[in-house]
Amino acid sequence: MKERAITGIQPSGRLHLGNYFGSIKQIIELQDDFPGECFCFIADYHAMTTIKDGKLLKEYTKNLIIDLLALGIDPTKTIIYKQSDVKEVCELMWILSNVTNKGLLERNHTNKEKIDKTVGLFLYPELMAADILGVGASLVPVGKDQLQHIEIVQNIASSFNVIFCETFIIPKAKVNSFQLLPGIDGRKMSKSYNNIIPLFCDDIELDKKIASIKTSSTPKGKSIIAKQEIIYQLYSCLASKKDVIKMEEDFINGILGYFEAKQILKNKIKEYFAPFKEKRKELLLDGDYVNGVTELCGKRVRDEFKITLEKVYKAVGLK
């Protein structure tokens, strides 16, 4: 049986450098390893645990689909779809909830960290299990902080298989070793900290963001430890190895000051994302194409879920 990969992205606002290098770039690379067997869903059901504005959720969802297509998600290789277009995921979640130990969900660290605790948040891993098991995914790319979620999914799938019959593939985690990018204030780049560098911002906003990057107070002409600087850490993701080494040497030798380094970083960001920005402009003018992609992909995923649910119905006695 072919390996199948799946990942989900919440529509929670504008994409930033941390999103791109932390997960999206890996998804795009993964589609070449699993052409036609790579699933990427816009997790709008999941986003409802935090977004309580219907218009905003709809806007974020639409923009995220366009952004992902612009950044390189190829619909001929990756099935990109809205989670809410696959209503079957909610039915599967309910069935799975009947083989899930309550204590398993209570131990979920995400639950403990959130202040506002809703049933939706409590069932977050259960819905994630339905997302993954419904399409028969065997591989799930995640960051280290999400490993527990995959362990919960594995537990749920194993419980079902033991209680009823061998129905689900037990998915494996593909851990992304990429280090979290710092935001302009030095903390991890996050929309909740308002310290992001958006991927598709205009030049004026980009100038302000780059100018605001926190630096040490070492004057130009003095040696600067490059690896401790946010500018260098961000530049390292974008530039060639040769250019990264040059920046480090220039910092150490006192040739490069913070103002010049920020200009180099800004120009590299503009250069790196210029083709993606052009592609995004084209997609914004072709709504029929974007809608057609998600509709076609949504149908493919619903068909996959129907196959899975037929097996589940027979196992649990609903058919």
Image: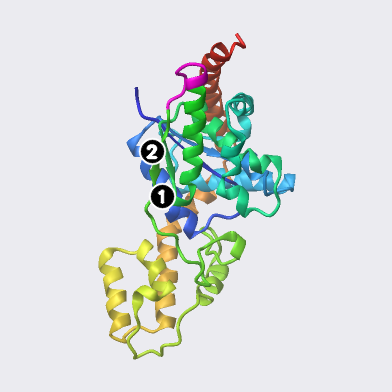
Location of the C terminus (image quadrant)? top right
Q: Nearer the viewer, residue 249 or 174?
A: 174
Location of the N terminus (image quadrant)? top left
**189 sits left or right of 94 in the view:** left
Q: Residue at the location (44% across, 30% down)? A: 137
**75 sits left or right of 202 in the view:** left
Magenta residue span: 162-169
Crowding around mark 2 (Cα neighbors within 10 Å: few <14, some 14 to 19, many 20+) is many
Spot occupied by residue 163 in the image (x, y as percentages of width and height) = 52, 19
Crowding around mark 1 (Cα neighbors within 10 Å: few <14, some 14 to 19, many 20+) is some
Q: Are marks 2 and 1 in contact (CB under 8 Å)?
A: no
Q: What's the amino acid at mark 2?
A: Gln
Relative vertical location of residue 9 with respect to residue 226 in this rendering, above or below? above
Q: Residue at the location (53% across, 33% down)? A: 129
Relative vertical location of residue 5 with respect to residue 196 in this rendering, above or below? above
Q: Nearer the viewer, residue 166 or 231?
A: 166
Q: Is residue 10 visible?
A: yes
Spot occupied by residue 114 in the image (x, y as percentages of width and height) = 64, 53
Q: What's the amino acid at mark 1?
A: Lys
Residue to which mark 2 is pinned: 31
Residue to which mark 1 is pinned: 25
Q: Which residue is situated farthest in the top direction here?
A: 319
Spot occupied by residue 154 in the image (x, y as percentages of width and height) = 46, 33
